Amino acid sequence: MKKTDIVLNEVARIDRLQDILDQAVEACPDRAAYLYRKGKNIVSVSFLQFYDEVRALGSALASLGVDEGHIACIGDNSYNWIRTFLTGLLSRGVFVPVDKQLPEGDILNVLNHSETDVVFYAKKFETFFQEKAAELPRVQYFIGFDREEDEGKFLSLKKLLDRGMELYRSGYAVYTSHMRSSDPHALKLLLYTSGTTGKAKGVMLTEDNLVGVVYYGLQVSTIYTTGLSVLPYHHSYEAVTDLLVSLHHHSTLAINESLAAVLKNLQEYHPDYIYLVPAFLEVFYKKIRAGMEEQGKWKTFQKGKKISRALLKVGIDVRRKLFRQVHEIFGGKLIKIVVGGAPLRPDVADFFDTIGITVCNGYGITECSPLVSVNLDYFCDFRTVGVKLPCIDVKIAEPGEDGNGEICVKGKTVMLGYYKDPEETARVLKDGWFHTGDLGNINRYQQISITGRIKNLIVMDNGKNVYPEEIEDYVMNVPYVQENVVSAVKDENGKTCIKVEVFFNADKIKELGKAPTEEEVLADVRSATDVLPSYKRPTVAAIRDTEFPKNSSNKILRQYN
């Protein structure tokens, strides 16, 4: 494939976010937009019902005089969260999603720093906001998803929605009249990044940014009829590339109950696509493989793999039939898994490819709304993160001998900057180019590969570059390793060498009957990394008693000392 060979999907044109809802209601008003469990029942919400409820909630906010303000939301994934999200995006104001796992002090800081005027919240935050309301002087209203009654600043969402529906149906148009006249290049979505250094920054995204991701993202990688929504909604990955993209594609989105219920919900809703992070795939893979090995079926699976690969070469695809039992674990209809947010282990991706489920790897960063690249549907190479969106330019700044340099992005999806932080904005935005801090390269097929982060790069004494993430990927092939971090240390002679620090998987250690020593760990790590050049192979090993500290995105805080 050459650059000129890239064929894009046809996608209905949108210029404003309102177009997404308008087109959905015109095309399929009675189709289920969302499915979610309420008690023992599955609730179905049609596109038309969702459309009306968004306008009703927006009308209610307009009647309170806060639809031009900053509208925050905090809580677990829910239909209430999605409805609030779209209401905020289509308002004259700014939507501020807040990470529900933040410490209380950080929640207060985000709400104050973002200049939030109204907060929507889940039941578990009721006591917190009742006690801390005085520390949020700008907030005019606290709207509880589960409140039954209004009490001063604290309002019931149900009552508010009922009042808004009356206004909307009576012709009240304050909320709806501005939708195509507001500035699409003004701040619309304010996302606070968690990062891996502990310092959160407010990323300013516009309506035009979001429209770019939805419209051009679908041109590169399509989805299907039914999705299972799993990842946290306060992250741009799920909020934009799943919630908004699914809405524009007119797909039905089933809302997952909890992380523990993912497999159950896969079998209950039978989705044909799902957005995940690689960690989920690794868990699925390990459990399925462990089950096969326990039942003595792993060798049979390997034989089936050889047969299916041979048939594929002559244009015959029997994978879904041959591995039907594995497909049933995922609901029986799963076609595609979109992954991003972390490196994808080749053996995990290969397993899903073997059984006939496409793993479509992509790359994004919140500052790019968040999508930069994704694999093409007809040319998917999970060793890369695919090709860039058509609406942006990507360059590799100052590439080294190995072709790796900093990935820089320019175009429609790049943020306005960091909220109230001009110095940090100027540091990463130069001549319109956003400097991602990620290292990578672009191959002859225009596919991007990520090799690591600049701040993690290790430069050896011989001048060679070492990317810790690459080595960590190999170390994860040691069965009893649950987590690991690779870093540089100096030996007694002052020479730079590679150190690996590991945290054990308790179940695997139990199977082994004893915990390996540091010497044994190093031997196993050396074996797992024997395909790498000698200077990349760890020479020092350490064992942790506890998991590595992580941010709210569950990414390891590498600078934890």
Image: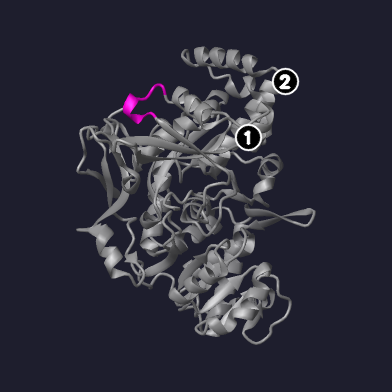
Query: In the rendered view, would you say 438 is above or below 400?
Result: below
Give the mark nearest the N terminus, 1 or 2.
Answer: 2
Q: Position of residue 188 (x, y in %)?
A: 41, 68
Residue 90 can be seen in this image: no
Q: Quadrant of the N terminus?
A: top left
Residue lying at 61% horizontally and 70% vertically, measured from the top left:
121
Relative to 187, 324 lies left or right = right
Residue with the most extreme right position: 40
Q: CA distance from mark 1 to mark 2?
A: 25 Å
> The magenta stretch spans which residues?
530-537
Residue at point 47% right, 12% down?
Answer: 314
Q: Position of residue 157 (x, y in %)?
A: 65, 74
Q: Residues within 10 Å of mark 1 (few under 14, many from 20)?
A: some
x and y percentages locating residue 110 in the rendered image: 48, 71
Is residue 117 placed above or below 437 in the rendered structure? Answer: below
Q: Considering the numbered disc 1 on the image, is that residue within a helix, a strand or a loop?
A: loop
Question: What numbered label is drawn on residue 295?
Answer: 2
Decide whether residue 534 is among the magenta residues. Answer: yes
Work out whether residue 337 or residue 269 is closer to the camera in this orientation and state it: 337
Residue 248 seen: yes
Kindly identify the residue that appears in the image at 52 percent across and 13 percent down.
311
Colour pattern: one colour
By secondary structure, the bulk of the magenta-drawn segment is best described as loop
Which residue has dot 1 on it?
333
